[in-house]
Image (cartoon, coloured by chain):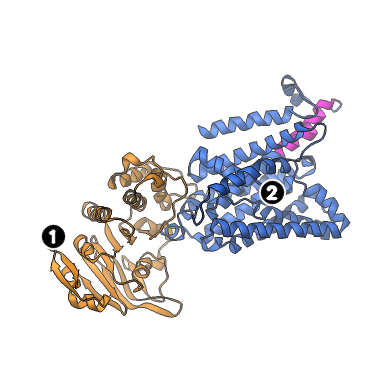
Chain colours: A blue, B orange
């Protein structure tokens, strides 16, 4: 029931995403524009060539980041865990940039796969630095490790862009944190990638619930914490890699979505993950719509909008944490 | 039957317990006693396969624990560790539902049998009325009963508990021990717990395992295990042992 309401809300936002923008489309015209193809109609070109790919990209990146944040927070028992804050986005962006610079411009599909090794390594690094592999990542330790890793990877990104002129082009296209170039990305493949990550997370859901009770009880319940953790890292990698390849690094979405999902669905993990996917997609689309409408005909990138929204939420969550509490 | 055969346990190369061969009586309440650092929790963890033996084996129904599939084992034997972690904001019902994890398949649909097991577990610890409350809103004793309901929802035949009464006041300690005794009497559950209070352990257990700094000191019925000699060997404590005026079980009086 609650998931149906969330789904209905997402559909409403999707409609809004198709209608709103520098060139408004009247709701009454939507069915006609989608119905028959007329390449000379500018409204139809706007809708099919620009807004629909943007919509699809927002769905993929938003759902994937919401799920990635949910999984990271469950595994680390840390409400500040987020692929953007803890360097997983930055890892994906850096490996994409590095690979594209070294290999030259390959086709978009193979380039976008380059996000995966970076996301995976960064996720592994932040979990092990933060003590997550031992199952006792306190909020402070994990957050510090992640922030340090994030800063390090972002400085590597800047270094690469400064050193190599062609990196700047790659950077502008891939790493801007925006849905604007969505039409030129291999959306079908990336949607499949994100879907794999989300399905894996859903399959792991009961084991993630066990893991969140502590390592000893998780094993008493017949799960293998090491395997669950490996599966969780893979799910985070697939989701984050796909999201970064679709939209560049978008921070704070994975931070804001899980507490909302938990408030709506409680601590049940599978429902929470579905809610996180719906909420993530909805919020990213809203951020994109707002960015389009605020200063027309210019745009504010969706990544900037989520940061505007996410910064205060980060402070709010951090203030609620009590020192020394395992949270 | 849960038993150990020439079991050697320890961290790194230093053995804590050596060549221990014990039988946990089936369908009885057993308490593991001894001073801090003598390996009580280590033994309990080994009985639940949470720690691997350095040598020897733990057998359940004649088979080494290592041979069991972990989910199959979790359906027969449950352990409540000393300090489990409660997810923030979890309700009692959601906590208890997690006890069904070993029974759920890959897709994990929630079946009627899962619902029934949870309802029964909540009833056994008398928390039905508080099922929708957040765990954090409960008193210490109620919270411990909620955790016990979680492991009961696993519907195990063997229930292992690591210091289930520590951090509870006397009334709640007795409440938990009575609950464990009732679970044993009503359902035939084999209960093994690590306890600190010797007299309470004697009163609420059928079988005691007393460990000392050099390994096993005594095992058997409470009146046979708790004597001035064994207490001195295990704890270095001079004490008198008198029958409890209410139950007749041994009561330890330090002197």
Question: Which residue does the image show at 56% across and 48% down from the upper left?
Answer: A319
**Depicted A22 relative to depicted A58: above or below:** above
Is the residue at mark 2 from the same chain as the one at mark 1? Answer: no
Pick the front one: A35 or A161: A161
According to the picture, the residue beneath numbered tag 2 turns out to be A242
According to the picture, the residue beneath numbered tag 1 turns out to be B247
Q: What stretch is highlighted in magenta?
A: A41-56
Q: Where is residue A23 in the image (x, y as percent from the top left)?
A: 80, 27
* Helix, strand or loop for the magenta stretch, by majority: helix
Counting other residues with Cα less than 10 Å from the Cα at mark 2, is it few (<14), some (14-19), or many (20 or more)? many
Assess whether residue A51 is covered by the magenta stretch. yes
Q: Position of residue B29 (x, y in %)?
A: 24, 61
Can residue A64 be seen here?
A: no
Counting other residues with Cα less than 10 Å from the Cα at mark 1, is it few (<14), some (14-19), or many (20 or more)? few
Q: Where is residue A4 in the image (x, y as percent from the top left)?
A: 54, 32
Can residue A208 be seen here?
A: yes
Pick the front one: B128 or B7: B128
Circles 2 and 1, Cβ within 8 Å, touching? The answer is no
Q: Position of residue B24 (x, y in %)?
A: 27, 67
Chain at numbered mark 2: A
């Amino acid at each position: 029931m609650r998931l149906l309401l969330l789904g209905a809300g997402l559909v409403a936002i999707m409609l809004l995403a198709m209608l709103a923008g520098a060139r408004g489309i009247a709701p009454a015209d939507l069915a006609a524009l989608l119905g028959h193809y007329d390449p000379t109609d500018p409204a139809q070109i706007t809708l099919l060539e620009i807004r629909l790919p943007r919509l699809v990209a927002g769905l993929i990146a938003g759902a994937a980041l919401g799920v990635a944040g949910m999984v990271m927070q469950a595994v680390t028992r840390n409400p500040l865990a987020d692929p953007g804050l803890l360097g997983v986005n930055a890892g994906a962006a850096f490996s994409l940039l590095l690979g594209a610079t070294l290999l030259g411009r390959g086709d978009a599909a193979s380039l976008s796969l380059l996000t995966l090794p970076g996301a995976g390594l960064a996720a592994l690094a932040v979990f092990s630095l933060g003590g997550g592999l031992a199952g006792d990542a306190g909020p402070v330790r994990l957050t510090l490790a992640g922030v340090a890793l994030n800063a390090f990877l972002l400085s590597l990104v800047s270094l690469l862009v400064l050193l190599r002129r062609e990196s700047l082009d790659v950077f502008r296209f891939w790493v801007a944190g925006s849905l604007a170039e969505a039409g030129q990305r291999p959306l079908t493949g990336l949607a499949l990638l994100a879907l794999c990550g989300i399905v894996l997370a859903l399959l792991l859901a009961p084991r993630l619930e066990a893991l969140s009770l502590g390592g000893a009880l998780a094993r008493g319940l017949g799960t293998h914490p090491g395997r669950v953790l490996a599966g969780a890292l893979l799910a985070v990698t697939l989701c984050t890699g796909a999201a970064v390849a679709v939209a560049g690094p978008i921070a704070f979405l994975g931070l804001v979505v899980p507490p909302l999902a938990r408030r709506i669905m409680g601590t049940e993990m599978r429902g929470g993950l579905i809610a996180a996917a719906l909420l993530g997609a909805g919020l990213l689309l809203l951020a994109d719509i707002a960015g389009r409408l605020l200063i027309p005909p210019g745009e504010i990138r969706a990544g900037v909008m989520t940061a505007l929204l996410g910064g205060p939420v980060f402070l709010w969550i951090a203030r609620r944490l009590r020192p020394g509490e395992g949270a | 039957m849960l038993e150990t055969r020439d079991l050697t346990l320890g961290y790194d190369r230093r053995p804590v317990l050596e060549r221990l061969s014990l039988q946990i009586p089936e369908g009885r309440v057993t308490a593991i006693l001894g001073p801090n650092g003598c390996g009580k929790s280590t033994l309990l963890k080994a009985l639940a396969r949470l720690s691997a033996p350095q040598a020897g084996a733990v057998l359940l129904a004649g088979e080494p624990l290592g041979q069991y599939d972990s989910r199959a084992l979790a359906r027969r034997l449950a352990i409540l560790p000393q300090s489990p972690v409660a997810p923030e904001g979890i309700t009692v019902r959601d906590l208890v539902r997690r006890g069904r994890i070993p029974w759920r398949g890959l897709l994990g649909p929630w079946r009627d049998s899962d619902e029934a097991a949870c309802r029964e577990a909540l009833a056994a610890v008398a928390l039905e009325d508080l099922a929708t409350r957040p765990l954090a809103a409960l008193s210490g004793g109620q919270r411990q009963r909620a955790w016990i309901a979680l492991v009961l929802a696993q519907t195990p035949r063997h229930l292992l508990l690591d210091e289930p009464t520590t951090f509870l006041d006397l009334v709640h300690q007795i409440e938990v021990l009575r609950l464990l005794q009732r679970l044993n009497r009503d359902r035939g559950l084999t209960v093994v717990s690590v306890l600190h209070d010797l007299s309470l352990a004697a009163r609420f257990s059928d079988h005691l395992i007393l460990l000392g700094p050099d390994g096993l000191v005594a095992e058997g019925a409470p009146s046979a295990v708790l004597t001035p000699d064994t207490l001195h060997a295990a704890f270095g404590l001079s004490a008198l042992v008198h029958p409890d005026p209410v139950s007749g079980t041994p009561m330890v009086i330090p002197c």
